[in-house]
Image (tube, grey):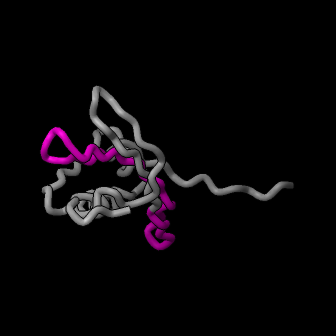
Amino acid sequence: MNHPDDAAHGVVAAVTDRAARRAKELGADQVLEALRAELELRPRLGRLIRTVVEGGQRIELYSTRIEDDAAAGRPAVNVVHAFAPAPPWPPTVRIAAVVPEDLLHPEP
């Protein structure tokens, strides 16, 4: 659900300290930075989780999956980010969580 005017508004995307630390622990810091840059162009990337209103401002919560990289020893991760379209200007994206994918294990 990308809106054609998202890139035209100069979206600012940032990673929280907690998300950056977790990405580094998982070896996903470089792919997280690539996602951050992509979110400046496509802030509605991923699956919409829900929309909330905080202090009169609409915030859209999204989840994006980054595939694993077996050669690099990096698991697949799910990234949760919040997009605040406006106001205030400029629109902002905050990457708030990086969670390793927990694969289902077969029943014994």
For the residue pair 62 and 18, the one nearer the viewer reads as 62
Could you tell me residue 60's position as x and y percent?
37, 45
Residue drawn at the location 13% of the way across and 56% of the way down: 10
Q: Can you say which quadrant of the picture contains the N terminus?
A: bottom left
Residue drawn at the location 45% of the way across and 52% of the way down: 48
Could you tell me residue 90's position as x and y percent?
13, 47
Left or right: residue 105 versus residue 55 is right
Is 17 contained in the magenta span?
A: no
For the residue pair 102 and 84, the one nearer the viewer reads as 84
User: Looking at the picture, does residue 108 appear above or below residue 66?
Assistant: above
For the residue pair 85 and 78, the one nearer the viewer reads as 85
Is 85 contained in the magenta span?
A: yes
Could you tell me residue 82's position as x and y percent?
34, 44
For the residue pair 56 and 80, the one nearer the viewer reads as 56
Left or right: residue 51 versus residue 100 is left
User: Looking at the picture, does residue 62 appear above or below residue 70?
Assistant: above
Taking the view exactly as shown, the residue that stands out farthest to the bottom is 71
The number of callouts visible is 0
Q: Can you say which quadrant of the picture contains the C terminus?
A: bottom right
Snapshot quadrant of residue 53? top left
Residue drawn at the location 26% of the way across and 48% of the way down: 93
User: Looking at the picture, does residue 19 appear above or below residue 105?
Assistant: above
Instruction: Tell me if residue 52 can be seen.
Output: yes
Left or right: residue 14 versus residue 62 is left
Q: Which residues are magenta?
A: 66-94
User: Looking at the picture, does residue 46 appear above or below residue 25?
Assistant: below
Left or right: residue 66 versus residue 40 is right
Residue drawn at the location 73% of the way across and 56% of the way down: 105
Taking the view exactly as shown, the residue that stands out farthest to the top is 55
Instruction: Tell me if residue 19 can be seen.
Output: no
Could you tell me residue 36's position as x and y percent?
27, 57
